[in-house]
Image: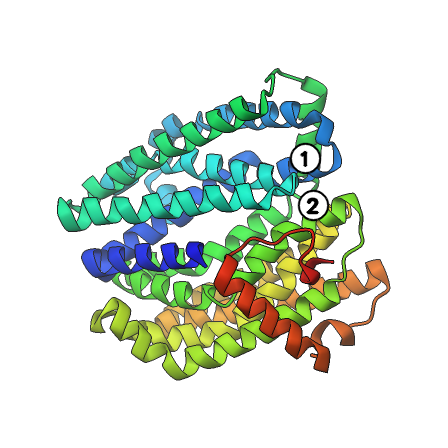
Amino acid sequence: MAIFLGSLIFGLITARELGPFGKGVLGVLAGAFSMLVTILSLRFERAVMFFCATKPQQVAQTVSSALYVGVAMLFFIPLYWCLPPGVTKYIFGGVSGEFIVAAFLFLPNTYLLLVLSALLAGQRRYERRLTILITAHVVRVLIAVVGLIILNYSLQQFIVLFGVSELVLYLIMFVTLVHHNAWSLRFDWNHLKEMVRYSAAGFLSIPSELVLANLFLFVLSVNQGSYDAGLFVVAIMMTNTLAYFANAIKVVILPYAASTSEIDESRVLRVLIGVELLMAIALVLLGRFLIVLLYGTQFEGSFLPAVLLIPGALSATVCSVLSASIQGRGRPGLASVATFLGSVCAVGLAFPMIFSYGINGAAVASTISNVISAVVAIVIYMRMTGRPIRPMLVIQPVDVHDTRAALVALWRDGDRPTRDNPTVR
Protein backbone atom coordinates (compact mmCIF):
# COMPACT_ATOMS: atom_id res chain seq x y z
CA MET A 1 0.00 0.00 0.00
CA ALA A 2 2.91 2.33 0.73
CA ILE A 3 4.18 1.91 -2.84
CA PHE A 4 0.74 2.61 -4.26
CA LEU A 5 0.42 5.77 -2.16
CA GLY A 6 3.92 6.88 -3.17
CA SER A 7 3.09 6.48 -6.87
CA LEU A 8 -0.22 8.25 -6.39
CA ILE A 9 1.30 11.24 -4.56
CA PHE A 10 4.17 11.57 -7.04
CA GLY A 11 1.73 11.42 -9.95
CA LEU A 12 -0.57 13.92 -8.28
CA ILE A 13 2.18 16.47 -7.59
CA THR A 14 3.73 16.23 -11.05
CA ALA A 15 0.31 16.43 -12.75
CA ARG A 16 -0.85 19.46 -10.78
CA GLU A 17 2.45 21.34 -11.01
CA LEU A 18 3.37 20.48 -14.60
CA GLY A 19 -0.09 20.32 -16.17
CA PRO A 20 -1.13 17.95 -18.99
CA PHE A 21 1.73 19.08 -21.27
CA GLY A 22 4.48 18.56 -18.68
CA LYS A 23 2.92 15.33 -17.44
CA GLY A 24 2.82 14.10 -21.02
CA VAL A 25 6.51 14.90 -21.57
CA LEU A 26 7.50 13.19 -18.31
CA GLY A 27 5.36 10.13 -19.07
CA VAL A 28 6.71 9.74 -22.60
CA LEU A 29 10.32 10.12 -21.43
CA ALA A 30 9.85 7.52 -18.69
CA GLY A 31 8.32 5.15 -21.23
CA ALA A 32 11.01 5.84 -23.83
CA PHE A 33 13.92 5.13 -21.52
CA SER A 34 12.17 2.07 -20.10
CA MET A 35 11.80 0.89 -23.69
CA LEU A 36 15.48 1.48 -24.42
CA VAL A 37 16.54 -0.40 -21.28
CA THR A 38 14.34 -3.33 -22.27
CA ILE A 39 15.74 -3.50 -25.81
CA LEU A 40 19.39 -2.86 -25.00
CA SER A 41 19.48 -5.32 -22.09
CA LEU A 42 17.27 -8.02 -23.67
CA ARG A 43 15.03 -7.73 -20.58
CA PHE A 44 18.02 -8.92 -18.55
CA GLU A 45 16.31 -8.40 -15.19
CA ARG A 46 14.20 -11.49 -15.90
CA ALA A 47 17.36 -13.52 -16.36
CA VAL A 48 18.61 -12.11 -13.04
CA MET A 49 15.41 -13.24 -11.31
CA PHE A 50 15.44 -16.69 -12.94
CA PHE A 51 19.11 -17.42 -12.20
CA CYS A 52 18.85 -16.21 -8.60
CA ALA A 53 15.98 -18.68 -8.13
CA THR A 54 17.58 -21.63 -9.92
CA LYS A 55 21.27 -21.08 -9.04
CA PRO A 56 21.33 -19.44 -5.61
CA GLN A 57 24.95 -20.47 -5.09
CA GLN A 58 26.02 -18.29 -8.03
CA VAL A 59 24.35 -15.02 -7.08
CA ALA A 60 27.68 -13.15 -7.18
CA GLN A 61 28.22 -14.20 -10.81
CA THR A 62 24.64 -13.22 -11.64
CA VAL A 63 25.12 -9.75 -10.16
CA SER A 64 28.44 -9.34 -11.96
CA SER A 65 26.84 -10.28 -15.28
CA ALA A 66 24.07 -7.74 -14.68
CA LEU A 67 26.67 -5.03 -14.08
CA TYR A 68 28.53 -5.84 -17.31
CA VAL A 69 25.31 -5.69 -19.32
CA GLY A 70 24.42 -2.38 -17.66
CA VAL A 71 27.78 -0.80 -18.51
CA ALA A 72 27.57 -2.02 -22.11
CA MET A 73 24.09 -0.51 -22.38
CA LEU A 74 25.43 2.97 -21.57
CA PHE A 75 27.18 3.07 -24.94
CA PHE A 76 23.79 3.93 -26.43
CA ILE A 77 23.95 7.47 -25.03
CA PRO A 78 26.43 8.91 -27.59
CA LEU A 79 24.55 7.11 -30.38
CA TYR A 80 21.57 9.39 -29.80
CA TRP A 81 23.26 12.20 -31.73
CA CYS A 82 23.81 9.85 -34.70
CA LEU A 83 20.14 8.88 -35.06
CA PRO A 84 18.06 10.54 -37.80
CA PRO A 85 15.55 13.11 -36.49
CA GLY A 86 12.64 11.06 -37.77
CA VAL A 87 13.77 8.08 -35.69
CA THR A 88 14.21 10.03 -32.48
CA LYS A 89 10.82 11.66 -33.02
CA TYR A 90 9.06 8.32 -32.71
CA ILE A 91 11.39 6.80 -30.09
CA PHE A 92 10.77 9.77 -27.79
CA GLY A 93 7.18 10.51 -28.78
CA GLY A 94 7.85 13.86 -30.40
CA VAL A 95 9.38 15.32 -27.21
CA SER A 96 11.91 18.08 -27.91
CA GLY A 97 15.65 17.40 -27.64
CA GLU A 98 16.23 19.63 -24.62
CA PHE A 99 14.05 17.39 -22.45
CA ILE A 100 15.52 14.19 -23.90
CA VAL A 101 19.12 15.21 -23.15
CA ALA A 102 18.14 16.25 -19.62
CA ALA A 103 16.64 12.79 -19.05
CA PHE A 104 19.58 10.60 -20.12
CA LEU A 105 20.16 9.53 -16.51
CA PHE A 106 16.79 7.76 -16.72
CA LEU A 107 18.64 5.03 -18.66
CA PRO A 108 20.95 3.72 -15.87
CA ASN A 109 18.36 4.58 -13.20
CA THR A 110 15.69 2.40 -14.79
CA TYR A 111 18.09 -0.51 -15.24
CA LEU A 112 19.49 -0.36 -11.70
CA LEU A 113 16.06 -0.37 -10.08
CA LEU A 114 14.91 -3.28 -12.25
CA VAL A 115 18.01 -5.34 -11.38
CA LEU A 116 17.73 -4.60 -7.65
CA SER A 117 14.08 -5.60 -7.63
CA ALA A 118 14.67 -8.75 -9.72
CA LEU A 119 17.65 -9.81 -7.62
CA LEU A 120 15.72 -9.76 -4.36
CA ALA A 121 12.60 -11.29 -5.92
CA GLY A 122 14.67 -14.16 -7.32
CA GLN A 123 16.04 -14.80 -3.83
CA ARG A 124 12.51 -14.53 -2.42
CA ARG A 125 13.64 -11.75 -0.11
CA TYR A 126 10.40 -9.88 -0.56
CA GLU A 127 10.63 -7.70 2.54
CA ARG A 128 14.00 -6.31 1.41
CA ARG A 129 12.58 -5.78 -2.05
CA LEU A 130 9.65 -3.94 -0.50
CA THR A 131 12.03 -1.74 1.49
CA ILE A 132 13.92 -0.75 -1.65
CA LEU A 133 10.75 0.03 -3.60
CA ILE A 134 9.24 2.04 -0.75
CA THR A 135 12.48 4.02 -0.37
CA ALA A 136 12.53 4.74 -4.11
CA HIS A 137 8.94 6.01 -4.06
CA VAL A 138 9.44 8.12 -0.93
CA VAL A 139 12.50 9.75 -2.51
CA ARG A 140 10.52 10.46 -5.68
CA VAL A 141 7.83 12.21 -3.67
CA LEU A 142 10.46 14.26 -1.83
CA ILE A 143 12.10 15.23 -5.14
CA ALA A 144 8.73 16.34 -6.50
CA VAL A 145 7.96 18.39 -3.38
CA VAL A 146 11.38 20.05 -3.29
CA GLY A 147 11.81 20.58 -7.03
CA LEU A 148 8.32 21.58 -8.08
CA ILE A 149 6.66 23.04 -4.99
CA ILE A 150 9.49 24.53 -2.91
CA LEU A 151 12.05 25.50 -5.58
CA ASN A 152 9.48 25.91 -8.39
CA TYR A 153 11.79 24.35 -10.97
CA SER A 154 11.00 24.32 -14.66
CA LEU A 155 10.27 20.99 -16.33
CA GLN A 156 13.82 20.67 -17.66
CA GLN A 157 15.39 21.51 -14.29
CA PHE A 158 13.10 19.03 -12.54
CA ILE A 159 14.08 16.25 -14.96
CA VAL A 160 17.78 16.86 -14.20
CA LEU A 161 17.16 16.93 -10.43
CA PHE A 162 15.09 13.76 -10.66
CA GLY A 163 17.72 11.89 -12.69
CA VAL A 164 20.69 12.85 -10.50
CA SER A 165 18.88 12.10 -7.23
CA GLU A 166 17.69 8.66 -8.34
CA LEU A 167 21.10 7.68 -9.73
CA VAL A 168 22.78 8.49 -6.41
CA LEU A 169 20.09 6.61 -4.47
CA TYR A 170 20.24 3.42 -6.57
CA LEU A 171 24.04 3.34 -6.59
CA ILE A 172 24.06 3.59 -2.79
CA MET A 173 21.47 0.78 -2.58
CA PHE A 174 23.42 -1.43 -4.95
CA VAL A 175 26.76 -0.94 -3.19
CA THR A 176 25.12 -1.51 0.21
CA LEU A 177 23.53 -4.76 -0.98
CA VAL A 178 26.81 -6.08 -2.39
CA HIS A 179 28.70 -5.13 0.77
CA HIS A 180 26.03 -6.59 3.09
CA ASN A 181 26.12 -9.95 1.29
CA ALA A 182 29.92 -9.94 0.92
CA TRP A 183 29.62 -10.88 -2.75
CA SER A 184 32.91 -11.21 -4.57
CA LEU A 185 32.08 -9.73 -7.94
CA ARG A 186 34.00 -11.29 -10.79
CA PHE A 187 33.48 -11.80 -14.48
CA ASP A 188 32.30 -15.28 -15.44
CA TRP A 189 31.97 -15.54 -19.19
CA ASN A 190 30.14 -18.87 -19.17
CA HIS A 191 27.60 -17.63 -16.63
CA LEU A 192 27.03 -14.46 -18.65
CA LYS A 193 26.49 -16.49 -21.82
CA GLU A 194 23.88 -18.64 -20.05
CA MET A 195 22.02 -15.56 -18.89
CA VAL A 196 22.18 -13.93 -22.32
CA ARG A 197 20.87 -17.14 -23.92
CA TYR A 198 17.96 -17.19 -21.48
CA SER A 199 17.19 -13.54 -22.22
CA ALA A 200 17.59 -14.01 -25.98
CA ALA A 201 15.22 -17.01 -25.95
CA GLY A 202 12.43 -14.65 -24.93
CA PHE A 203 13.52 -11.87 -27.29
CA LEU A 204 10.23 -12.03 -29.17
CA SER A 205 8.48 -10.75 -26.06
CA ILE A 206 10.64 -7.62 -25.85
CA PRO A 207 9.33 -5.65 -28.84
CA SER A 208 5.90 -7.13 -28.19
CA GLU A 209 5.67 -5.91 -24.60
CA LEU A 210 7.09 -2.54 -25.59
CA VAL A 211 4.46 -2.12 -28.29
CA LEU A 212 1.65 -3.01 -25.87
CA ALA A 213 3.02 -0.71 -23.16
CA ASN A 214 4.17 2.31 -25.15
CA LEU A 215 2.96 2.38 -28.75
CA PHE A 216 -0.42 4.01 -28.09
CA LEU A 217 1.05 6.73 -25.87
CA PHE A 218 3.87 7.49 -28.31
CA VAL A 219 1.65 7.61 -31.40
CA LEU A 220 -0.85 9.76 -29.50
CA SER A 221 1.95 12.11 -28.43
CA VAL A 222 3.29 12.45 -31.99
CA ASN A 223 -0.14 12.84 -33.59
CA GLN A 224 -2.08 14.81 -30.96
CA GLY A 225 0.72 16.43 -28.94
CA SER A 226 1.96 16.24 -25.35
CA TYR A 227 -1.28 17.67 -23.91
CA ASP A 228 -3.38 14.66 -24.95
CA ALA A 229 -0.48 12.40 -24.00
CA GLY A 230 -0.66 13.85 -20.48
CA LEU A 231 -4.38 13.07 -20.28
CA PHE A 232 -3.66 9.51 -21.44
CA VAL A 233 -0.88 9.10 -18.87
CA VAL A 234 -3.31 9.94 -16.06
CA ALA A 235 -5.89 7.52 -17.54
CA ILE A 236 -3.25 4.80 -17.56
CA MET A 237 -2.29 5.64 -13.98
CA MET A 238 -5.91 5.23 -12.89
CA THR A 239 -6.33 1.82 -14.53
CA ASN A 240 -2.89 0.67 -13.39
CA THR A 241 -4.27 0.70 -9.85
CA LEU A 242 -6.32 -2.35 -10.88
CA ALA A 243 -3.16 -4.29 -11.66
CA TYR A 244 -1.33 -3.19 -8.50
CA PHE A 245 -1.88 -6.45 -6.64
CA ALA A 246 -1.19 -8.48 -9.80
CA ASN A 247 2.20 -6.79 -10.17
CA ALA A 248 3.02 -7.79 -6.61
CA ILE A 249 2.02 -11.40 -7.21
CA LYS A 250 3.68 -12.03 -10.57
CA VAL A 251 7.18 -11.36 -9.17
CA VAL A 252 6.47 -14.30 -6.85
CA ILE A 253 5.14 -16.57 -9.59
CA LEU A 254 8.32 -16.73 -11.69
CA PRO A 255 10.77 -17.69 -8.88
CA TYR A 256 8.35 -20.30 -7.51
CA ALA A 257 7.70 -21.80 -10.93
CA ALA A 258 11.45 -21.83 -11.62
CA SER A 259 12.28 -23.68 -8.42
CA THR A 260 9.29 -25.91 -7.58
CA SER A 261 6.52 -25.60 -10.19
CA GLU A 262 4.05 -26.06 -7.32
CA ILE A 263 1.83 -23.06 -7.90
CA ASP A 264 -1.92 -22.99 -8.25
CA GLU A 265 -2.23 -20.24 -10.87
CA SER A 266 -5.97 -20.86 -11.09
CA ARG A 267 -6.48 -19.78 -7.51
CA VAL A 268 -4.14 -16.82 -7.94
CA LEU A 269 -6.03 -15.59 -10.99
CA ARG A 270 -9.46 -16.01 -9.44
CA VAL A 271 -8.47 -13.95 -6.41
CA LEU A 272 -6.80 -11.29 -8.56
CA ILE A 273 -9.79 -11.01 -10.87
CA GLY A 274 -12.11 -10.72 -7.86
CA VAL A 275 -10.02 -7.90 -6.42
CA GLU A 276 -9.72 -6.10 -9.75
CA LEU A 277 -13.43 -6.37 -10.56
CA LEU A 278 -14.30 -4.67 -7.28
CA MET A 279 -11.74 -1.95 -7.94
CA ALA A 280 -12.99 -1.53 -11.53
CA ILE A 281 -16.56 -0.95 -10.33
CA ALA A 282 -15.30 1.68 -7.90
CA LEU A 283 -13.30 3.34 -10.70
CA VAL A 284 -16.33 3.54 -12.99
CA LEU A 285 -18.56 4.97 -10.24
CA LEU A 286 -16.08 7.35 -8.63
CA GLY A 287 -13.38 7.84 -11.26
CA ARG A 288 -14.49 11.20 -12.61
CA PHE A 289 -14.84 12.65 -9.10
CA LEU A 290 -11.44 11.27 -8.07
CA ILE A 291 -9.66 12.58 -11.16
CA VAL A 292 -11.04 16.10 -10.67
CA LEU A 293 -10.35 15.97 -6.92
CA LEU A 294 -6.79 14.69 -7.23
CA TYR A 295 -5.56 16.12 -10.51
CA GLY A 296 -7.86 19.08 -11.17
CA THR A 297 -10.46 19.85 -13.83
CA GLN A 298 -7.71 20.07 -16.47
CA PHE A 299 -7.52 16.25 -16.37
CA GLU A 300 -11.26 15.55 -16.54
CA GLY A 301 -10.71 14.31 -20.10
CA SER A 302 -8.82 11.33 -18.67
CA PHE A 303 -11.96 9.68 -17.26
CA LEU A 304 -13.52 8.14 -20.38
CA PRO A 305 -10.18 6.72 -21.66
CA ALA A 306 -9.62 5.22 -18.20
CA VAL A 307 -12.99 3.44 -18.34
CA LEU A 308 -12.24 2.17 -21.85
CA LEU A 309 -8.88 0.79 -20.61
CA ILE A 310 -10.44 -1.31 -17.81
CA PRO A 311 -11.09 -4.53 -19.81
CA GLY A 312 -7.55 -4.34 -21.13
CA ALA A 313 -6.16 -3.96 -17.62
CA LEU A 314 -8.04 -7.08 -16.46
CA SER A 315 -6.77 -8.98 -19.51
CA ALA A 316 -3.20 -7.81 -18.89
CA THR A 317 -3.37 -9.34 -15.42
CA VAL A 318 -4.28 -12.75 -16.84
CA CYS A 319 -1.55 -12.54 -19.49
CA SER A 320 1.18 -11.35 -17.10
CA VAL A 321 0.53 -14.02 -14.45
CA LEU A 322 0.35 -16.91 -16.92
CA SER A 323 3.35 -15.66 -18.93
CA ALA A 324 5.41 -15.38 -15.74
CA SER A 325 4.49 -18.97 -14.87
CA ILE A 326 5.39 -20.23 -18.36
CA GLN A 327 8.68 -18.35 -18.28
CA GLY A 328 9.47 -19.64 -14.79
CA ARG A 329 9.06 -23.16 -16.14
CA GLY A 330 12.02 -22.46 -18.41
CA ARG A 331 10.06 -21.57 -21.59
CA PRO A 332 10.69 -17.85 -22.15
CA GLY A 333 10.26 -18.21 -25.91
CA LEU A 334 6.82 -19.79 -25.56
CA ALA A 335 5.86 -17.18 -22.97
CA SER A 336 6.49 -14.43 -25.52
CA VAL A 337 3.98 -15.69 -28.11
CA ALA A 338 0.95 -14.15 -26.36
CA THR A 339 2.38 -10.64 -26.19
CA PHE A 340 3.73 -10.95 -29.73
CA LEU A 341 0.30 -11.64 -31.20
CA GLY A 342 -1.19 -8.86 -29.07
CA SER A 343 1.45 -6.45 -30.33
CA VAL A 344 0.69 -7.37 -33.96
CA CYS A 345 -2.91 -6.39 -33.27
CA ALA A 346 -1.71 -3.18 -31.56
CA VAL A 347 0.35 -2.12 -34.59
CA GLY A 348 -2.60 -2.75 -36.87
CA LEU A 349 -5.01 -0.76 -34.68
CA ALA A 350 -2.93 2.06 -33.18
CA PHE A 351 -2.51 4.36 -36.16
CA PRO A 352 -6.01 4.21 -37.68
CA MET A 353 -7.74 4.31 -34.27
CA ILE A 354 -5.68 7.22 -32.94
CA PHE A 355 -5.80 9.21 -36.19
CA SER A 356 -9.60 8.76 -36.31
CA TYR A 357 -10.65 8.88 -32.66
CA GLY A 358 -7.71 10.39 -30.78
CA ILE A 359 -7.27 9.52 -27.13
CA ASN A 360 -10.40 7.33 -26.96
CA GLY A 361 -9.20 5.40 -29.99
CA ALA A 362 -5.90 4.76 -28.23
CA ALA A 363 -7.73 3.35 -25.21
CA VAL A 364 -9.95 1.03 -27.27
CA ALA A 365 -7.02 -0.22 -29.35
CA SER A 366 -5.02 -0.93 -26.19
CA THR A 367 -7.90 -2.90 -24.67
CA ILE A 368 -8.45 -5.05 -27.78
CA SER A 369 -4.71 -5.85 -28.00
CA ASN A 370 -4.50 -6.88 -24.34
CA VAL A 371 -7.60 -9.07 -24.62
CA ILE A 372 -6.01 -10.95 -27.54
CA SER A 373 -2.78 -11.43 -25.55
CA ALA A 374 -4.74 -12.84 -22.61
CA VAL A 375 -6.66 -15.31 -24.78
CA VAL A 376 -3.44 -16.60 -26.38
CA ALA A 377 -1.72 -16.88 -22.97
CA ILE A 378 -4.62 -18.95 -21.64
CA VAL A 379 -4.48 -21.32 -24.62
CA ILE A 380 -0.70 -21.79 -24.29
CA TYR A 381 -0.90 -22.34 -20.53
CA MET A 382 -3.71 -24.91 -20.92
CA ARG A 383 -1.78 -26.85 -23.55
CA MET A 384 1.42 -26.75 -21.49
CA THR A 385 -0.05 -27.79 -18.13
CA GLY A 386 -3.18 -29.66 -19.15
CA ARG A 387 -5.28 -27.58 -16.77
CA PRO A 388 -8.81 -26.47 -17.82
CA ILE A 389 -9.83 -22.85 -18.28
CA ARG A 390 -12.89 -22.80 -16.00
CA PRO A 391 -11.02 -22.98 -12.66
CA MET A 392 -8.83 -20.09 -13.79
CA LEU A 393 -11.54 -17.56 -14.56
CA VAL A 394 -14.77 -18.60 -12.80
CA ILE A 395 -14.87 -17.27 -9.25
CA GLN A 396 -15.76 -19.91 -6.65
CA PRO A 397 -17.58 -19.30 -3.32
CA VAL A 398 -14.35 -19.89 -1.40
CA ASP A 399 -12.72 -17.08 -3.42
CA VAL A 400 -14.89 -14.49 -1.68
CA HIS A 401 -12.99 -15.15 1.53
CA ASP A 402 -9.65 -15.20 -0.32
CA THR A 403 -10.48 -11.93 -2.09
CA ARG A 404 -11.34 -10.25 1.18
CA ALA A 405 -8.08 -11.51 2.70
CA ALA A 406 -6.15 -10.30 -0.33
CA LEU A 407 -7.66 -6.81 -0.08
CA VAL A 408 -6.83 -6.66 3.62
CA ALA A 409 -3.25 -7.75 2.89
CA LEU A 410 -3.03 -5.21 0.06
CA TRP A 411 -4.10 -2.41 2.39
CA ARG A 412 -1.89 -3.43 5.32
CA ASP A 413 1.27 -4.76 3.72
CA GLY A 414 1.58 -3.36 0.22
CA ASP A 415 3.33 -5.81 -2.14
CA ARG A 416 4.91 -8.03 0.50
CA PRO A 417 3.98 -11.59 -0.51
CA THR A 418 5.77 -14.34 1.39
CA ARG A 419 6.17 -18.09 1.23
CA ASP A 420 3.27 -18.40 3.63
CA ASN A 421 0.86 -16.27 1.58
CA PRO A 422 -1.91 -18.69 0.56
CA THR A 423 -2.47 -16.93 -2.74
CA VAL A 424 0.94 -17.98 -4.06
CA ARG A 425 0.88 -21.60 -3.06
Q: Where is residue 399 in the image (x, y as percent from the top left)?
A: 68, 76
As drawn, is 334 to the left or to the right of 213? right
Q: Position of residue 230 (x, y in %)?
A: 30, 61
As drawn, is 421 to the left or to the right of 146? right
Q: Residue at x 49, y 56 (%)?
A: 213
Q: Is mark 1 on a helix, strand or loop?
A: helix
Q: Alpha-carbon neighbours of circle 1 within 10 Å: few (<14), some, or many (≥20)?
A: many
Q: Position of residue 386 (x, y in %)?
A: 86, 64
Distance of label 1 from label 2 (alpha carbons): 8 Å
Q: Earlier in the sequence, mark 1 or mark 2?
A: 1
Q: Quadrant of residue 76?
A: top left
Q: Quadrant of residue 101?
A: top left
Question: Which mark is drawn over residue 52?
Answer: 1
Question: Which mark is drawn over residue 276?
Answer: none
Residue type at mark 2 is Pro
Image quadrant containing the C terminus: bottom right
Residue that carries the numbered disc 2 in the rendered image = 255
Q: Residue at x 52, y 35 (%)?
A: 40
Q: Position of residue 131 (x, y in %)?
A: 48, 43
Q: Tell which of 35 and 237 is nearer to you.
A: 237
Residue 35 visible in the shown view: no
Q: Alpha-carbon neighbours of circle 2 within 10 Å: few (<14), some, or many (≥20)?
A: many
